[in-house]
Amino acid sequence: MSAMTRPRPRVAAAAATVAAAALVLTGCSSTGSSTSGEGQVGFVTVKGTNLSKADTGKRGDAPDITGETLEGNQVKLSDYRGKVVVLNVWGSWCGPCRAEAKSLQAVAEKYKDQGVQFLGINTRDTDKTNAVRFEQEQGVTFPSIFDPAGTQLLKFPKGSLNPQSIPTTLIVDREGKLAARAVGGTTEDALESILQPVAAEQKQ
């Protein structure tokens, strides 16, 4: 066997890693299964919807995602400990992301004085300009971590983030635990239905 045809284990391994990462970030869908791996993070699907939630005591820890925002500032999830954080995974290339953007912004403004912080994770936008333009066009003012390769998404525990459905919105409670999830595009009413109970916790 010549040197030209000899297998290259390192190259093959690298290709497999890239392929695996690509699978994690496949497609943009407004629907998707929300049951895979649910038991690991305590999520229970709300019947007949793309929403799921986890009761207090059955919630898994959210990873401390970190990175540079589209505005160039460094941010990490733990900066907001003590607040409820709404994490929205989105891309400027994604139709359902565009459809839900104004609803997310409306809810962010409504709950900003209730200890709720919205934080986006922008993924698969290789050009930051496209993501910034998306925010400007949609009137989105909350920060988003620029994560074109999806490295921050890979930090989430199995079952918390459905990889086949972008956008996905996750609600992190005041203790940094994953409390609820909306798979695919969401609306103001749907998002509030899972956000309001978490925002009300520890305020009774």
Image (tube, rainbow, N blue to C red):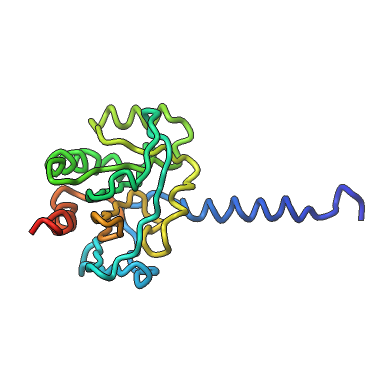
Horizontal and vertical percent position of residue 56: 22, 67
Quick check: 62 above or below 43? Answer: above
Q: Quadrant of the C terminus?
A: bottom left
Quick check: 119 above or below 23? Answer: above
Q: Residue at x 28, y 45 (%)?
A: 80
Horizontal and vertical percent position of residue 23: 51, 55
The part of the image, by quadrant, that contains residue 98 is top left
Quick check: 85 above or below 148? Answer: below
Q: Residue at x 45, y 54 (%)?
A: 155
Horizontal and vertical percent position of residue 100: 24, 44
Horizontal and vertical percent position of residue 5: 85, 52
As drawn, is 158 to the left or to the right of 17? left
As drawn, is 123 to the left or to the right of 135? right
Q: Quadrant of the N terminus?
A: bottom right
Q: Residue furthest bottom?
A: 39
Number of marks present in the image shown: 0
Q: Residue at x 37, y 37 (%)?
A: 92
The part of the image, by quadrant, that contains residue 201 is bottom left
The part of the image, by quadrant, that contains residue 61 is bottom left
